[in-house]
Image (cartoon, grey):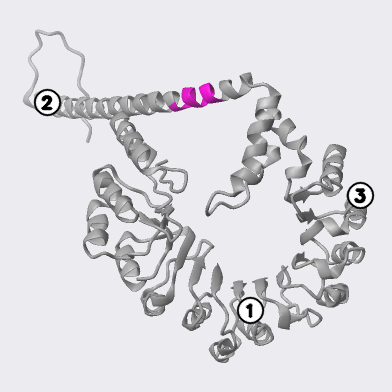
Amino acid sequence: MSLELRACSPNTILSNTERGAMFDILSGLDGCIVGFDDDIARIRKVLDSLQDHRAEISVRAERIRERLALEAKLPPEILTKIFVHWAGNEYIKLPQTQGPFMAVSQVCSRWRGVALAEPLLWGRLYVLMPFSKQIASLVHSILSSRGGRGPVDLRINVYNSNHWEIMQNLVSTYPSRIRKLQIYTGSSRYLKAIVGPLKPMEIDHMRIFDKGSSDETNADLHVLEDCVNLEGIELMDDNDVPLPHTVIPWAQISRLTLLTSSPPAILSNILHRCPALVRIMVRTKKSNQNASSFPSRLCTLEHLAELYILGGDDVCHLLNFLVLPALNKVHFQDRIDWPQAEIKDLIQRSACRIEYFHTLHHIVPTEDIIPLMRAMPHVIEFRAKPIHPVSKPVFDTIIQEHLAPHLRTLTGWFIDRDSLDSAVAFLQSRWSKSASGEYEGVSYAHLPISQRTATDDDYLRKVLRGLNTKDRCVSFN
């Protein structure tokens, strides 16, 4: 039963029942006030934190604006000299430097104008169709440039027939300028149309994304029989019916990518035909078929050195690749769960030969880093994102036990503020001189922005000035 309090003057004497009820109400209101005060305090704390983050981001944004403002003031002639140095022969002579890459569609108009005005420097083309007349003109300029650095790697995305004839004419007009042809296509009929006019012996790599039927695809793939130098092929299909691809010259294939719905049995038959295989990127569909013959077929792959596990519905049988004697580079390249205990044990038992260990996208538990390094005494490149920032004890253990003494490249690690000194000591302990007298070292480390302060930035600037030279680089982002 609820009690209704009657309105009364201040001089009215309350009954004991009314007095007790009012004390209960007052106690409840006081509790609400305390709760609101706590909420207000938390909100103020969050606001203060947001203000601090906003100030830090504003400072970074202002620095970027200042740099862009400098570029905006430079005349086109200076920008051209910078681009020529960046994309030209002088830049790529630096040790361990790959050819530069510029996404022309993602840079400002001034840089884009400079890049498009220098067709001789282009070595790779990625054309997404349909495209504008300006892009067609650019492709024509690049392919027709007689003074270019060399053959052009051409990658074409074709998902409809718009402008396909234009690209076909361009490719057939300058076949000698094309070294590597990659085709992403929604139908293998485009493959037959574009490869036909080319000199097949000059094509060493094919990439086919096929949505057609198996019969149609194999009929169009007969064009590959003339590709005597074909060493790499990437086959992808969305069908539930596996593609047999009987016309492909498997014996000469050294680089294979299979992103298909084929079960392990089909994959096993394909691998049996590829004795020269050096690199494989593979993802297969889970199947109820017996895959017991899969490990036995791997014994023919005595030259396989690189393994890319791209995930899929079932990756357990793919880990049988780890027992191969020449394997020294392993990539986990899709968002797959970190292997369970028995699979992890297989990795660690087979890891003594691994020199390159990459886990892109998925996260390695921090507690597994030390066991992995202990199992990989010859690892040179270790790319893995820990699930938590790497702590000081982890770095101290690596240094004290002299784990991974050959490690030269470390990528993707999150470093907390408390472990900065240990991280720097770790980086410095990994510098060494190569036979040519040049320094090599760990190339990348990552400090979470959310934990950075102005003091950290000052400290990192001093560290980078001491560690970075032309031939070695450490970056804290």
Place of residue 226 in the rendered image (x, y in percent of width and height, measured from the top left): 86, 75
Give the structural element (helix, strand or loop) at label 1. loop
Compare marks 3 and 2 and give the one earlier in the sequence.
2
Query: What amino acid type should be assigned to the residue bearing mark 3?
Result: Ile
Residue at coordinates 72% horizontally, 36% vertically from top-left? Answer: 115
Residue behind mark 2? 23
Residue at coordinates 80% horizontally, 61% vertically from top-left? Answer: 186
Give the structural element (helix, strand or loop) at label 2. helix
Mark 1 to mark 2 CA distance (whole Å): 84 Å
Query: What amino acid type should be assigned to the residue bearing mark 1?
Result: Leu
Place of residue 449 in the rendered image (x, y in percent of width and height, measured from the top left): 38, 38
Q: Nearer the viewer, mark 3 or mark 1?
A: 1
Quarter of the image for residue 457 reads top left
Question: Callout 1: few (<14), some (14-19), or many (20+) C-alpha neighbours within 10 Å?
Answer: many
| Residue 335 horizontal side relative to residue 213, left or right | left
Quarter of the image for residue 207 reads bottom right
Magenta extent: 60-67
Quarter of the image for residue 173 reads bottom right
Q: Nearer the viewer, mark 3 or mark 2?
A: 3
Residue at coordinates 45% horizontally, 66% vertically from top-left? Answer: 357
Q: Nearer the viewer, mark 1 or mark 2?
A: 1
Question: Callout 3: few (<14), some (14-19), or many (20+) C-alpha neighbours within 10 Å?
Answer: few
Residue behind mark 1? 277
Place of residue 212 in the rendered image (x, y in percent of width and height, measured from the top left): 82, 69
Magenta stretch: includes residue 412: no
- Quarter in which the N terminus is drawn: top left
Instruction: Give the camera-side residue of 361 and 150.
Output: 150
Instruction: Give the camera-side residue of 209 and 279.
Output: 279
Residue behind mark 3? 166
Compare marks 3 and 1 and give the one earlier in the sequence.
3
| Residue 131 horizontal side relative to residue 420, left or right | right
